[in-house]
């Protein structure tokens, strides 16, 4: 299994809870000076990897190995740009699951 703390084009940051704009429109792009390093993300349990070909991600051997190693039996894909506005917000609202939440981001952000 190959996760990395150096994934190209992966940027994350803490969103300020006291920012009215963030609270009103969490699905809009927001950037702050509170960037989170990929090492810090990994320490929080956020694991990342890159695929060799976006067009052939379903055949990517690294993703296949990750699914096997972590016991993932199902997955789904979501194009957040095609979702109704209210549905997009759920991706930006903190919530908990009994199992790991797995997201494959092909382009854009979530």
Image: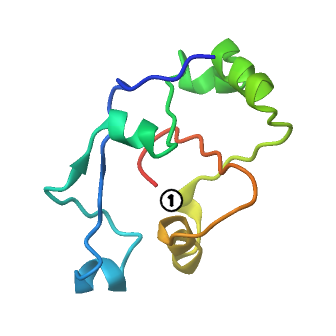
Dot 1 lies on which element?
helix
Q: Quadrant of residue 32?
A: bottom left
Q: Nearer the viewer, residue 104 or 100?
A: 100
Q: Is residue 45 visible?
A: yes
Relative horizontal placement of residue 26, taking residue 105 as reference (left or right): left
Quarter of the image holding residue 7?
top left
Write the residue at 41% across / 47% down: 108
- State how the image is colored: rainbow
Who's the residue at 22% across and 49% down the image?
A: 35
Q: Position of residue 110 (x, y in %)?
A: 46, 55
Q: Which quadrant of the figure contains the N terminus? A: top right
Residue 93 higher or lower than 35, as above or below: below
- The answer to whether residue 12 is above or below residue 67 is below
**Which residue is at the front of the view, 26 or 5?**
5
Instruction: Name the residue carrying label 1.
Output: 81
Q: Residue at x 26, y 64 (%)?
A: 30
Q: Tell me: 65 left or right of 28.
A: right
Q: Which residue is at a point 29% across and 66% down the rendered structure image?
A: 15
Please count the marks in the image.
1
Would you identify the image quadrant in which residue 98 lies?
bottom right
Q: Residues within 10 Å of mark 1 (few under 14, many from 20)?
A: few
Residue 99 x/y as whole percent: 74, 52
Question: Residue 10, can we see it?
Answer: no
Q: Position of residue 23 (x, y in %)?
A: 34, 82
Point out the residue furthest to the front here: 43
Q: Work out whether residue 53 or residue 66 is closer to the camera in this orientation and state it.
A: 66
* Residue situated furthest left in the rendering: 33
């Amino acid at each position: 299994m190959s996760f990395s703390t150096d994934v190209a084009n992966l940027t994350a940051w803490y969103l300020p809870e006291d920012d009215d704009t963030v609270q009103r429109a969490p699905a809009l792009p927001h950037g702050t000076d509170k960037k989170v390093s990929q090492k810090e993300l990994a320490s929080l349990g956020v694991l990342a990897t890159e695929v060799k070909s976006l067009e052939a991600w379903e055949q990517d051997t690294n993703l296949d190995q990750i699914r096997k190693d972590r016991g993932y039996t199902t997955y789904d894909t979501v194009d957040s740009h095609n979702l109704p506005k209210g549905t997009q917000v759920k991706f930006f609202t903190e919530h908990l699951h009994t199992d790991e939440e797995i997201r494959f981001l092909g382009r854009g952000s979530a």
